[in-house]
Amino acid sequence: MKTGEPGLITTTLEKALEWGRSNSIWPLTFGLACCAIEMMAVQASKVDISRFGSEIFRSSPRQSDLMIVAGTVTKKMAPRVKRLYDEMPYPKYVIAMGVCVIQGGPYVEGYSVVLGVDRVIPVDVYVPGCPPTPEALTYGIMTLQKKIRGENTR
Amino acid sequence: MSEWVELNMGPQHPSTHGVLRLKIKVEGEIVREVEPVIGYLHRNAEKLCENTFFCDNLLYFDRMDYVGAPGMEVGYLEAAEKLLGVPPPERAIWIRTIMAELSRIASHLVWLGAYGLDLGMLTPFFYAFDLREKIMTIFVEASGSRLLTNYCSIGGVYQDFNEKIVQEIEDFINIAPSKIEELNSLFVKNDIFISRTKGIGYMSKEVAIDYGVTGPMLRASGVEYDVRKAEPYLAYSKVNFEIPVSSKGDNLARFLVRIEEMRQSVKIISQAIKKLPDGPFFNPKAKKSMMIRMRGEGEVYARTEASKGEFGVYIVGDGGVKPYRVRVRSPSLKNLSVLREIGKNVMIADLVAISGTTDLVFGEIDR
Amino acid sequence: MEFQPGEEKGKDGRKIIKVKKEDLLSTLESLKKKGFNHLSLITGVDRKDYIEVVYHLHSFESNEYVVVKTVTYNSKVPSVTHLWKSADWDEREEYDLMGIEFEGHPDLRRLFLPQNWVGHPLRKDYNMKNVQYINMDEDGEDYATFDPGDGW
């Protein structure tokens, strides 16, 4: 019931910060391969990521909080991934999207693919699938939000 | 004496459509030399194909041109089925035609959305992906997957078109032309778009042929060449469509050729869905228990018109269950190599507009 | 199987012209004069004791397709970059992955892999177990290394 009276919530400053942080995750525009197309679909109108406060894809790592590693990380690309991660300001988060990023996927037997991006940078949330649907990536971002807020996900 | 400054663009750059790195030498704001550096998505698909069964290799082809996966499957199967001697039945051919054309529209829509972003227009991206979602629902209904469908298989297709898919495709045909017009008007009625594309990035006919450019880029330079007409495969000889050609050779021409191609694709789909014959959708010679035992000997080259250009697959078999050598003619690789020529002596901002029109997909360039 | 120069028809109905390595350039030149202005593809096939090099040519005017095939025992063939510009990257790619040296190529470097990568991956005798890693130096150039501590 709306009475017009101002409401009152008591919380700690940390909780308020976490809440704000979790609802304004700005991802980095960082598409590597197939999964990047699904990452674009997440941005588009059907599964609108801006409902979760992540609508602004920054082109520069210095302005972003979240790196969605979307697509196969090759050995040649891995030093760049590391460097981009280093350029991001704290606090920073990483979502590994797709099996190629998690463990190599269909290219696991090859000679030029890194077997999992977690050998290069720390990963917060793994989203499996080849490629994961936009819904799955949205769920991954919601899981990350829960992680930032320190909620129990189970 | 003026000084040249060397700049690096990419591999992480919003307008390189993936992991392209451009080494450019600039004099003031004019690009004097541009050298693309590729290989950041080299996933050794050709090597892995040699260690995998003929039927399983399809998955690496799906992941080449990932924005239009069924088009790639068709290209591989054209070659593999000739090598193995298992031709698909008539119904499967028509189904594949529909899927290939749908994937062409899907691929062009991604390109349209991304090209809008390159030029600083955000709105067309949402419109393009809205229409693309309709194609994705058809793909999900047919194959269960959105992007990398793995729908076609050796000797036919994975499952038959049911009534729901046919209904969805008909719905798509009804709404697509008006949506494409809407998208087109978003671009061509915009003065900024016209001034950034008209007369910029000119590529002459001779340069295009010399560098082996194919697809919409070649047609925008005035060569009427389309594998669907030159060497008809699937059911393309039985449907009516036209090849859009422009003699202008600039960015705007390449844009308009792609828009017209989408219209023609809708035309092809609407004819194919009416002509869809009854019958089996799978060649019984290639049933699931036989699939990994199929042997191929000899060598076959097949070329198809993918959304980027002429996609060729060259398979050498030594009589085993796995191919001896698989080689892919990637259209995007050739289309990118011409950037060294047409990216010279332009402004840095125009370089983005030019490299955008080449329609790069790195899964296919680096493989 | 002995390599015999001559003409034959492939399994896919394309005309295959087999030539000796010495006659390769003259054959391709005469084909270009006939109007084959589109070099579609250069392929190397490792046949263990020799390497087959296959050229796919296409003519836009007459819509003909022809396949030219040659063999090389010392993995060296003459470059055709002066005839078709599209051969440039194709030859670099084949040099990178197959190890064919194209004599006369203006800029024969690896296309995909770092310059000091050891071996050519598409060769049949390439050892996949010998893992190589790649790292980046301060200029942004890549280098390959066998040391897992110095690369990814």
Image (tube, coloured by chain):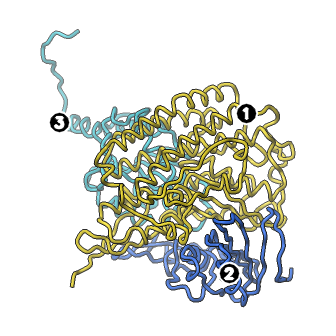
Chain colours: A cyan, B yellow, C blue
Q: Looking at the image, which residue is at 86% across and 83% down?
A: C2
Give the quadrant of the N terminus of chain A: top left
Discs 2 and 3 carry the same chain letter: no
Secondary structure under badge 2? Answer: helix
Discs 2 and 1 carry the same chain letter: no
C-beta proximity under 8 Å, tags 1 and 3: no
Q: Amino acid at mark 1?
A: Lys
Whole-number angstrom distance, CA of label 2 to CA of label 1 = 44 Å
Q: Chain of mark 2?
A: C
Residue identifier under label 2: C28
Q: Is residue C118 above or below residue B274?
A: below
Secondary structure under badge 1? Answer: helix
Q: Is residue B230 above or below residue B136?
A: below
Picture coordinates of residue B139, whole percent (x, y): 60, 37
Residue identifier under label 1: B275
Q: Amino acid at mark 3?
A: Leu
Q: Looking at the image, which residue is at 60% across and 53% down?
A: B306
C-beta proximity under 8 Å, tags 2 and 3: no
Q: Chain of mark 1?
A: B
Residue B237 seen anywhere in this rendered image of the structure: yes
Q: In the image, B207: left or right of B329?
A: left
Q: Quick one: label 1, few (<14), some, or many (20+) residues within 10 Å?
A: few
Q: Amino acid at mark 2?
A: Leu
Residue B32 occupies which quadrant of the picture?
A: bottom left
Of B188 and B54, the residue lying toward us: B188
Picture coordinates of residue C68, whole percent (x, y): 73, 76
Secondary structure under badge 3? Answer: helix
> Could you say which disc has been placed on residue A55 in the image?
none
Residue identifier under label 3: A13
Single out the residue that lies furthest toward the left.
A5
